[in-house]
């Protein structure tokens, strides 16, 4: 009988939680500003949350952690945030910011309030970025002239204009790069990849997805050796003077403007479209 009573009580508690009105989260903002040199690194590591980077002013790097806790009192917010490790540090290499759940804690998902920690970052465009989150999207807005590395296990990655090497990887979202002016490595297991423009100055371009389509806009004067393939769709090269050495519905190789740089695109679950940049749908 006790077993039945406990089961009924558990069901009633779950139903009450589901029917209870949604609590507006309490929000706290923790902000730090550092002076950073050209070529130094700003590294952000979150256990879950969005990372948004915008151009900064001068030599200042300003990082704001936006903490949202779904509770009704400040005391409950303090208790929930006590299970998170938050640290800002400046080293000879640059700045490192970390916000993650403390290790070794036993988490009861029924009783623990929901905590979201996002990072808003403003940095000079000549500072390297090393961005990691296990549960959110990553966006780098504006022009960035230093290398970018971005990793997420549960969201999309978007970059506006990158003029240095880029290495972006996600296990659960799409990748969008409006302009690639340097080396680009892009990997996703669960989304599409769209590059608005690969400029004439770009080096190696290597994009791969297991679960979506690929679209690349190419500057007309770019000199590239192209290898594009798909297992689950069609490869098309449009409005570009490609000298093809192999051309089929599923695999195209050849040289563009005599070749030089390397462009490889492959997908297991969609189409690959390579076209002159500026056409409708590139960006």
Image: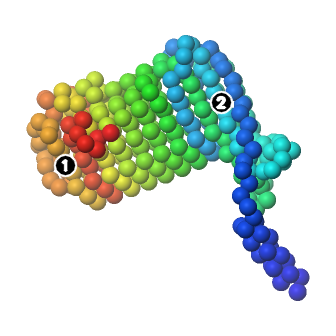
- Asked whether 246 or 160 is in front, the reply is 160
User: Which quarter of the image is occupied by the C terminus?
Assistant: top left
Locate the N terminus and report the quarter of the image it occupies.
bottom right
Q: Determine the residue positioned at 69% across, 27% down.
A: 31
Q: Residue drawn at (42%, 24%), measured in percent from left and top?
A: 143
Is residue 3 something that shows in the picture? Answer: no
**Of label 2 and label 1, which has the lower sequence position?**
2
Res 260 → quadrant:
top left
Q: Is residue 213 left or right of residue 253?
A: right
Residue 123 lies, in percent from the top left, at 55, 22
Task: Please determine whether, in this image, residue 107 is positioned above or below residue 28.
Answer: below
Q: Position of residue 186 (x, y in %)?
A: 39, 40
Q: How many marks?
A: 2
Quick one: SS at disc 2? strand
Q: Which mark is residue 65?
A: none
Quick one: SS at disc 1? strand
Between marks 2 and 1, how big is the CA–CA gap? Answer: 43 Å
Q: Outermost residue toward the bottom?
A: 1
Mark whose residue sits in front, 2 or 1? 2
> Which residue is painted at 34% across and 43% down in the image?
194
At label 1, counting other C-alpha atoms closer than 10 Å, the crowd grade (few under 14, some 14-19, many 20 or more) is some
**Residue 141: x and y, percent?**
47, 31
- Residue at label 1? 236
x and y percentages locating residue 215 in the rendered image? 29, 45
Residue 64 — which label? 2
């Amino acid at each position: 009988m006790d077993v039945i009573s406990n089961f009924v009580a558990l069901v009633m508690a779950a139903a009450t939680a589901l029917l209870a009105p949604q609590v507006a989260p309490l929000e706290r903002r923790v902000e730090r500003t550092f002076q950073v040199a050209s070529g130094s690194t700003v590294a952000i590591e979150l256990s879950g949350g969005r990372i948004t980077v915008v151009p900064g002013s001068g030599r200042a790097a300003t990082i704001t952690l936006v903490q949202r806790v779904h509770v009704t009192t400040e005391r409950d917010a303090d208790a929930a945030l006590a299970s998170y490790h938050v640290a800002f540090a400046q080293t000879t290499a640059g700045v490192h910011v970390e916000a993650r759940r403390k290790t070794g804690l036993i988490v009861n998902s029924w009783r623990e309030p929901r905590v979201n920690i996002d990072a808003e970052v403003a940095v000079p465009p000549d500072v390297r970025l090393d961005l990691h989150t296990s549960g959110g999207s990553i966006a780098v807005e504006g022009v960035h002239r230093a290398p970018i590395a971005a990793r997420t296990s549960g969201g999309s990655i978007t970059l506006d204009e990158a003029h240095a090497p880029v290495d972006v990887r996600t296990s659960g979202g799409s990748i969008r790069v409006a302009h690639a002016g340097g080396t680009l490595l892009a990997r996703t297991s669960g989304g599409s990849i769209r590059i608005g423009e690969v400029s004439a100055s770009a080096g190696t371009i290597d994009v791969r997805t297991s679960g979506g389509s690929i679209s690349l806009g190419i500057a007309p004067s770019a000199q590239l050796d192209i290898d594009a393939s798909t297992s689950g769709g069609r490869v098309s090269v449009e409005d570009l003077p490609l000298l093809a050495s192999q051309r089929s519905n599923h695999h195209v190789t050849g040289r563009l403007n005599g070749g030089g740089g390397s462009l490889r695109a492959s997908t297991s679950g969609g189409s690959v479209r390579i076209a002159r940049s500026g056409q409708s749908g590139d960006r």
